Amino acid sequence: MSKKIIIYTLLFFILLGSGRVVFAQAGTEAEAGSQITNISNIIKEKTPEFISKPIIWLANKIETFRQGYSETLKTKKESLKKEITAVNETNQKPSITETKSRIEKPIRYILLFLVSLLLDIFSSQLLFYVCLTILVFLMLRFVWLRIF
C-alpha cells in the first residue's frame, strides 16, 4: 500500500513538472483556451444537439469553476504572504503565547505551500484536467472494486 502511495505521489509531481514544460513549449494559455473553444465547436457541429448541449454545459461549468477558484486562491495566497510577513516582523518578548506563535508560523508556511500548489494546478488547464481525470479514474476504480 505504501509503495502505491509513493508511486502515485511521484507520478503526480512528474505530471506537475511536465505540465509546465508542455505549456512553455505550446505557447500561452490563451492558445490552449482557443483550442478548447475549437473542440467545443467541433462537438456542436458533429454531435446531435441533445448530446452536445449537456457536454458543452458541463465543460463550461468546469472551466468557470477552475477560473473562479484560481482567482480565489490568488487572493488567499497574497493574504497568507502578508500574514507571514506580519508574524516575521513582530519581535515579541518571550511569554506564554510564544508556544502558540511557534506553532502558528510553520502552519502558515505549510498553508502557503498547499495554496501555492493548488494555485499552480488550478491556473494551468493541462494540470487541472490531468488531475481531474486521474481523480475521476480513481473514484470509478474504487466504486468498481466495491461493486465487484
Image: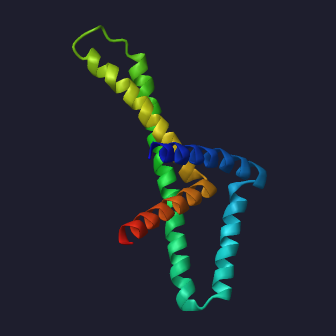
In the rendered image, which quarter is residue 38 located in?
A: bottom right
Q: Is residue 135 visible?
A: yes
Residue 106 or residue 132, whichever sits in front: 132
Residue 24 or residue 85, whichever sits in front: 24
Q: Position of residue 32 (x, y in %)?
A: 69, 61
Q: Is residue 119 visible?
A: no
Residue located at (54% from left, 62% from top): 133
**Residue furthest out toward the left:** 96
Task: Please state if 29 lies on the left or on the right of 147 as rendered.
Answer: right
Q: How many marks?
A: 0
Above or below 80: residue 12: below
For the C terminus, give its image quadrant: bottom left
Q: Position of residue 65 (x, y in %)?
A: 48, 62
Task: Please state if 32 lies on the left or on the right of 129 as rendered.
Answer: right
Residue located at (44% from left, 47% from top): 1
Task: Please state if 94 lies on the left or on the right of 60 as rendered.
Answer: left
In the rendered image, which quarter is residue 35 located in?
A: bottom right
Residue 125 or residue 14, whichever sits in front: 14
Residue located at (37% from left, 30% from top): 107
Residue located at (50% from left, 48% from top): 4
Above or below 76: residue 57: below
Q: Position of residue 31 (x, y in %)?
A: 73, 61
Above or below 18: residue 96: above
